[in-house]
Amino acid sequence: MDIGGIISATLVVGITGLVIGLLLGLAGTFFAVKVDEKEQQIRKCLPGNNCGGCGYAGCDALAHAIFTGEAQANACPVGGAAAAEQIGKVLGVEVKAAEQRKAFVRCKGSLDYAVLNEKGRKICKYGCIGCGLCEKECKFDAIRVENHLAVVDEEKCVGCGQCAEACPRHVISLVPKLAGHIVACSNLDKGKEAKAVCRAACISCGACAKVCLAGAISLESGVARIDETKCTGCGACAEKCPMKAIV
């Protein structure tokens, strides 16, 4: 190929690249998703952990949901009251902080209490198995497995709920941060069956419900449950529980 052909080919390639670049630039401008300035301000108020505890894919998605009115301004469990207040200022409204929550493991089946089989595994089919999936999912180092039982660090827990979603036995739940007394057991068996697999299991005897003057305790499917909205925190149930399953 002579020099003229080389130059022509180079020009064609260069011009083609330039045209493609211009077209891509125009397409990017034309199809660009415009983000409202107020939505950007809301996003800046969020912590950026992208933990998903709000129920959305991440902080960007939550900011958009708050901006459009799909989500409440206090929906971020990590940002808490501070983020809610800042978002309220952006929106020009007064925002009340959402009730703070914490993760709670409804099981006391550590190796100190759990009955094991010949392979050294817990035989309770309802309790924590110490698999560590909750620990792996927690972005705040707020839960760890100790003595084959998940333990929550309440000082670090932000109530995002990722550990609860990860738990294969569903023994972790979110409860009010200032919860009084809670039944730390998920065993649905009654009496001897529950006692045979764990020395700290709720045996559904009803003793706690009988001494609760606030009427906050009921027996549901073989396990005691405490209504935190009624609980006065007197501690009578915990003292009466023969298995010490209420903490």
Image (tube, rainbow, N blue to C red):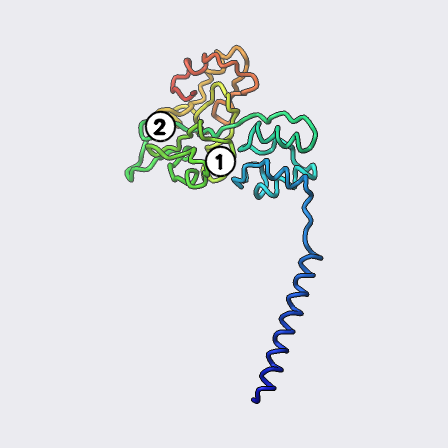
Residue 5's image quarter? bottom right
Residue 144: x %, y % from top left: 39, 34
Between disc 2 and disc 1, whose residue precedes?
A: 1
Given this view, does label 2 or label 1 mark the residue nearer the observer?
1
Residue 96: x %, y % from top left: 63, 25
Q: Which residue is mark 2?
A: 196
Q: Amino acid at mark 1?
A: Ala
Residue shown at 45% from the left, 15% from the top? 237
Q: Is residue 213 left or right of residue 40?
A: left
Query: Does 200 sit above or below residue 6?
Result: above
Q: Nearer the viewer, residue 5 or 243?
A: 5
Q: CA distance from mark 2 to mark 1?
A: 26 Å
Residue 10: x %, y % from top left: 59, 79
Query: Does 214 sit above or below residue 38?
Result: above
Residue 104: x %, y % from top left: 46, 28
Would residue 189 be seen by someone viewing this image from the given angle? no
Q: Nearer the viewer, residue 193 or 131?
A: 131
The quarter of the image holding the C terminus is: top left
Q: Which residue is mark 1?
A: 164
Residue shown at 45% from the left, 41% from the top? 137
Q: Amino acid at mark 2?
A: Ala
Q: Secondary structure at mark 2?
A: helix
Q: Is residue 112 left or right of residue 6?
A: left
Q: Nearer the viewer, residue 134 or 127?
A: 134
